[in-house]
Each structure stands twice: as C-alpha cells, then as structure tokens.
Image (spheres, grey):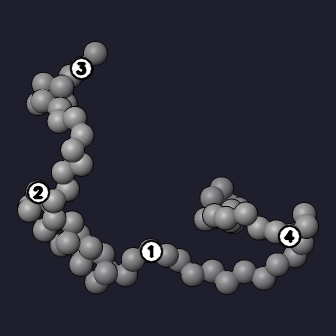
C-alpha cells in the first residue's frame, strides 16, 4: 500500500533493514467496466435482499438520532 509517500508491505517481509529492492508498481484500482459490473452486482444482491447480515436493524429514529 502506498501511504504518506511510503510503500508499506501488506505482509511481513523477511529482509534485513535498509535492503535495496526493486519494486513493480501496478495500481489495483478497478477498470471502469469492472467497476460498473461490480456496482451492478451489488445492486442486484441488494435488491434481492441477499445482503442481510442478520445484525441489529436500526429504526429510522435511531438512524437519525442527534445529540
């Protein structure tokens, strides 16, 4: 992951400190067509009610509660 100007490994790396390494950078952002397909699938599952986690269902008043 690239964060704050630094590349951070997502898994432990067995290298001595200050070892010079080569790095191939490939952004993992979805392509527009893949993104559209993922959104369509999300909407299909949501409309079908498949995304029910079984967790607590908040009431409208709870969702809009203000301090």
Secondary structure under tag 3 reads: loop
| Label 3, residues with CA under 10 Å away: few <14, some 14-19, many ≥20 | few
Q: Which mark is residue 66?
A: 3
Give the labeled residue for mark 1.
29
* Tag 4 residue: 15
Q: Are marks 1 and 4 in contact (CB under 8 Å)?
A: no
**Is the C-beta separation of discs 4 and 3 under 8 Å?**
no
Structural distance between the alpha carbons of marks 2 and 3: 29 Å
Residue 63 occupies quadrant = top left
27 left or right of 3 in image: left
Q: In what quadrant of the picture does the C terminus appear? A: top left
Dot placed on the residue nearer the N-terminal end, 1 or 4: 4
Where on the picture, by quarter, is residue 43? Answer: bottom left
58 w.r.t. 40: above or below: above
Q: Residue at x 12, y 25 (%)?
A: 61
Q: Residue at x 31, y 81 (%)?
A: 34
Q: Nearer the viewer, residue 45 or 53?
A: 53
Where's residue 25, x and y in %?
63, 80
Residue 59 place in picture, x, y as percent: 12, 30
Q: Quadrant of residue 6?
A: bottom right
The residue where tag 2 is placed is 49
Residue 1 pos. (x, y %): 61, 65
Find the distance from the CA under tag 4 to the CA under tag 3: 51 Å
Comes first in the chain, label 4 or label 3: 4
């Amino acid at each position: 992951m690239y964060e704050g100007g630094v590349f951070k490994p997502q898994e432990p790396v067995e290298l001595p400190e200050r070892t010079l390494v080569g790095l191939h950078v490939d952004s993992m952002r979805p392509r527009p067509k893949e993104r559209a397909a993922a959104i369509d699938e999300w909407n299909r599952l949501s409309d079908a009610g498949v995304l029910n986690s079984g967790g607590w269902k908040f009431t409208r008043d709870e969702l809009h509660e203000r301090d």
